[in-house]
Image (cartoon, rainbow, N blue to C red):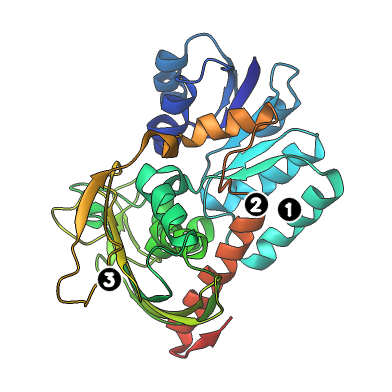
Amino acid sequence: MKRIGIVGVGGIANGVHIRELLEVPECKITAICDVNPKAIEKTKEKVGDVLVFTDYRDLIDSEEVDAVEVCTPNHLHVEIAEYAVKKGKPVNVEKPLGLSVADCARLEKVIAEKDILNMMCFSYRFKPAVRWAKDMIDKGLIGDIVTINVEYSKSSAFWQGRRMDWRFVKKYAGTGVLGDLGVHLIDMAQLLVGDFKSVSATTGIVVKERQLLDSDEWGKVETDDYCNFIAELSDRRNGKSVSATFAITRCALGHANTIRYDIYGTEGCISFNLNNPEELTFCTDKKDGMSAKIETSKVPEKYYITQERAFVDSLNGKFCDYFPTVKDGIKCQTILDAVERSAEEKIIINI
């Protein structure tokens, strides 16, 4: 039985980590940490009798914790994960890994020195449609990849009464939708297609001011509400260039959390909408182009696994395909930095 400690028990911890961990019988949540008493009480209602801490060091030092999940605001990810690794405890870190590649460097160094198991929370790698798409692409069923079109749409910028939480403050978040949402698209592109070669981006803020969390005053929003960029990738199967477009926004009314991927190859295409993660749409019968048939199928059972099941399995020495690590987090952080710089300087950035 693996004993799990969770640092940060806000929305992502309760919405994904805790829910999935409670479905894995080989583990037990034994400790939680947060500075928000309301978040602590809400979480205790779900997980029952656990140790409670307000300092992450105390949780990590506890003899009742075998592994640590880091679910805090972005600026704390590296600091907390680094402490856990130095203490010899495996970590599962929320995305994005940090605020910049420079911010992440010290974690990469200590992981290499300590050789500690680590995982990045690239949760969409564990959606059945993504895993089946990866397998089909690797088998060459759509030929050489030519273009990909990617979209992540939410309406969270327009949530009524939403105040200036940490996601709107640069020193805590780094970026807005780019790091919060776009990092998932970037990771999936690197998983499904290959490495990035260049990016050209534009970003913007739509809701310019928000009321502060703890007062009647208003503050200036500092992070992007939308980010659009074009990119050139290298198809890992043959080294050929792939053209890609990415559209990311939290200003899409009517969309709670929509992720769409269209991947076009010389012999077919693959599409998925992760509002329906158990379905994959594809064409793998080129024929003469005009008569090629697109079909939608339910994903086979062998592609099903949850993020937290994968983490607990790894603690027991069993690793699933496409297991994401901090190394993948740093690769994505490199692209985030390049996209941010491209938008700021209005130039193409070569990776």
Q: Could you tell me which residue is drawn at 70 percent across and 24 percent down?
A: 66
The residue sitting at the top extreme is 49
Say whether marks 2 and 1 touch (CB < 8 Å): yes
Which tag is nearer the camera, tag 2 or tag 1? 2
**Secondary structure beneath disc 1?**
helix
Residue 301 image position (x, y, % from top left): 38, 33
Which tag is nearer the camera, tag 3 or tag 1? 3
Q: Is residue 209 left or right of residue 170?
A: left
Q: Amino acid at mark 1?
A: Leu
Q: Is residue 337 left or right of residue 112?
A: left
Place residue 334 in its image quadrant. Answer: bottom right
Q: Amino acid at mark 3?
A: Lys
Q: Residues within 10 Å of mark 3 (few under 14, many from 20)?
A: some
What residue is shown with label 2? 326
Viewer-proximal residue, 101 or 222?
101
What residue is shown with label 3? 286
Check the picture and name the quadrant holding the C terminus: bottom right
Q: Distance from label 2 to label 1 (Cα)?
A: 8 Å
Q: Distance from label 3 to label 2 (Cα)?
A: 38 Å
User: Of label 3 and label 2, which has the lower sequence position?
Assistant: 3
Say if 1 sits above or below 173 in the image. above
Q: Could you tell me which residue is drawn at 47 percent across and 91 percent down?
A: 347
